Image: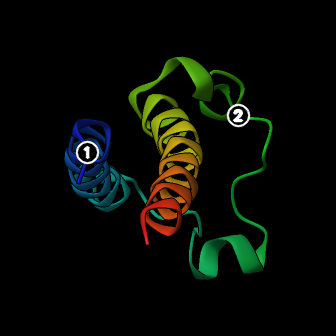
Amino acid sequence: MSVVQVILSIIYVILGVAISAVILMQEGKSNGLGSAIGGISGDSYWSKNRGRSMEGTLEHFTRYGAIVFMIITIILNVLLKAQG
C-alpha cells in the first residue's frame, strides 16, 4: 500500500465515524401525528432560519461529508484496482 492509500484510508474511517455520529445527533424530520392532522405549518421562524442553526450545520456536514466519502471511495477503488 502506498502512503496515499494509507492516508486516504485513515481519512475514510474517521469521516465514516463522524458522519455516523452527526446523523445520530440530528432530529427526526417527521412531526408525528400532529403534522398529519394539520399541525405546525412550514413557514415558522425556525424553518426560515434553519441554515443558521445547529441542525442546519449538521445537515450541511452530512451532505458534504457524504459527498467527500463517496469521492474517497471511488479514489481508493481506482488505486486498489491499479495495484492489482
In this view, the mark in front (2 or 1) = 1
Q: Nearer the viewer, residue 58 or 31?
A: 58
| The C terminus lies in quadrant | bottom left
Tell me which amino acid carries mark 2: Ser
Q: Residue at x 59, y 31 (%)?
A: 46
Q: Nearer the viewer, residue 68 or 54?
A: 68
Q: Residue beneath label 2, please?
A: 44
Q: Nearer the viewer, residue 23 or 4?
A: 4
Left or right, residue 33 beside residue 13: right
CA separation in Å, label 2 and label 1: 52 Å
How many neighbours does mark 2 have within 10 angstroms: few (below 14), some (14-19), or many (20 or more)? few
Tell me which amino acid carries mark 1: Ser
* Rendered position, 30 above or below 73: below
Left or right, residue 69 beside residue 44: left
Q: Residue beneath label 1, please?
A: 2
| The N terminus lies in quadrant | bottom left
Determine which of the numbered discs, if any, sits on residue 57 in the image.
Answer: none
